[in-house]
Each structure stands twice: as C-alpha cells, then as structure tokens.
Image (spheres, helix red, strand yellow):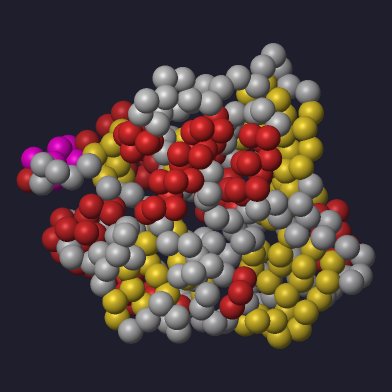
Amino acid sequence: MSDGYRLLDGADLTTRNTFGVRARTPLLVEVDDAAALPRLFASGIVDAADPSLLVLGGGSNLLFAADAPGPVLALSARNVETGPGDGDSVLVRASAGVPWHDLVMHTLSLGLSGLENLALIPGTVGAAPIQNIGAYGVEVRERILAVEAFERATGHVVRLPAGECGFAYRDSAFKRDPGRWIVTAVEFALSRRDAPMLDYAGLRDELAGIAAPTARQVADAVVRIRSRKLPDPAVLGNAGSFFKNPVVALARAQALRAAHPTLPVFPVAAFPADAAAHGEAGGDLRKLSAAWLIDACGWKGHRDGDAGVSAGHALVLVNHGAATGAQLLALARDIAASVHERFGVVLEPEPRIIGADW
C-alpha cells in the first residue's frame, strides 16, 4: 500500500464481476481514499487521460467480453455520514465504495426513508448515479442532492447538483462520458417521515393488508419480490436486468398495444435527454416491458451451453458456470435481434460492455 492506494499486477477480475466470467487486467489499483487520486495520477503509474482506464465498482453492471484493455481502478472507501437537512430532510453522504444495499439498510436503521424501493440492488453507491438505478417506481436521481466526482482532465473534485448530472432513464452524464469523471461520493436528501411510493402494482400486492406501510416494510417487501424473481449472483452469475425497457413514442406504443393487448406500457418521466433522443416531448413517450417482449420471443429459460436466460425472469442473462463474456454477449445480441425482427423494437443493454461494441 502506498499513499492511499494499492497496486496489483496482472490481477484476476473473475470475482470482481457478478457474471463471474473470467477476465484479467494488467494493473488493478485499489484506492482506499479518494483524496489519493491526484497523487496516484501525478505519480505516472496510471494516466488519467488513458481511455482504457476502467473504474470498477461492484462489477454488477458490466460484462467483460474480453480482458480489461488497460488498468482498472477500484474505489474501496466505505464512509457514510449524516448532516443537517431542511425540515424533515436529512443529508446523507456516502463514499463511492459503499455497497448499495448496505447503504439502504443503514439509512433505514437511522429512521430515514427514501431509498427503500431500491433495496437489494447489487453494486456500489458510486455506480448508482452513473446508471440512474431504479426499481419499483423510484429512480435514484429523485433522492440525490449532489454527486461528487473527480474530473480526470483537471485533477479536481467537483460537486455537481442533481440538476447538472444529465439524468435520463438508466442514464446520466457520467455514463455518457465515462472518460471524464470518477464518482467519489454521493449526497442524498432523505426524510424522517415515511412517505411510501407504492405505484408499482407488484409492490402494492406484496403489501396488501398493511394500511400504512413503513419504509422498512416497503424495503422488506422489495427484498422478498427481488429474491423470488432474480437469481442470487453468488449462486448463479448474472448482472440483474440485462436490457433497458425500451422507450418509444406514444403512437408507436399505442400501435404495439393494439396488436398485442397484454404488452405492459408505462409512462415515462419527462427527462430532456430522453425526449431529445426520441424527438418527442416527455409526455409523448412510453416505456415498454423488455421482459414481456423477450418472453414473447421464447427466450425465458433458454440455454446455450453455460450462457442462458433465467427461467424466472426474461430480462436476466445468466452464467451457468463457465460461460465466457463473449458467449453471453452473443446470446444478448441474438435476443435483441429476435425482438427487433418480431416487434420492430430496439433493445439496448443496461450493463457496460468491456472489450466489444454492442
């Protein structure tokens, strides 16, 4: 260990990605203190401008289709602090290396609500704003006050208010420009009062009979639902939902629904980035169920060697043991091609793909 970071040459990344696929990096840098980043880059050991530099969190939102092409940097600090808020609001600041579910449960133990719908999502705090993680009717951008990030070009840490993070559906400025930022910490505005978000039908059903569920009861319900639907990465390698739910223009959604009455269609939050991408106002967009589309094409439970699709959830690609990242990527491409051929809908992957283009 030197100056807040550790260097490991020729490191194995198999246990550092939840798919459990074999991958290596020529150099793994474990950073225990984000304040060490300027010293690390000034040392010349790692070049901040190197486009091949990969920042790795919990490895739950990427697929190694090949070895890492360059050095890998992992932030391991796990500090959580609370501070004064405004009225019922409480500020919570968490380092990028904090496991996400641990943060959710910690805030609940403090009597704070706001993150309960996002319980049991794998990964780290640092990855949460990059992907704008969401589940059961809540997106993390709704709870983020600001994101602290190291700007690689300037060597400075900046604090970006949520409105400057370019959030969109499963997207952000950090994801669109990964070579610019290293997320070091996230600030959340949480509440001392329970204000359950129960718009998601499955969550309402799980909590049936509880008139006014607490935040902890909502989190427990989310954990039960996710545990039933999604395989445990520790048992069966996966990265959760592999595909985004496609966002389409309202007219397109209506046409598909008319042809396929059971296709789930959802409203979309009015993100400027989403609207611009589709040439529509936010209210004229709709989100389709990728799981329904994939299931309708017969992929649920499919297996090709050790690369497969979960029998419990069509959105989840799984590694039954010895699948390579390239094999999982080939399967994902076949799935997307079949959905496009049948429905004319383009599927996009949620995980970042390393070593290949989508």
Q: Height in image: 342 above or below 333?
A: above
Q: Residue at x 77, y 68 (%)?
A: 30
54 and 144: which is toward the camera:
144
Q: Is residue 157 left or right of residue 143?
A: right
The prevailing secondary structure element of the residues shown in magenta is helix
257 inside magenta stretch = yes
Where residue 174 appears, x then y in whole percent?
59, 51
Q: Residue at x 27, y 48 (%)?
A: 289
298 and 178: which is toward the camera:
298
- Asked if one can make out residue 134 in the rendered structure from this viewpoint, the answer is no
- Asked if one can make out residue 138 in the rendered structure from this viewpoint, the answer is yes
Where does the magenta region start and end? 251-258
Q: Height in image: 191 above or below 106?
A: above
122 and 125: which is toward the camera:
122
Q: Is residue 115 left or right of residue 93?
A: left
Q: Residue at x 18, y 65 (%)?
A: 298
Q: Is residue 33 left or right of residue 174?
A: right
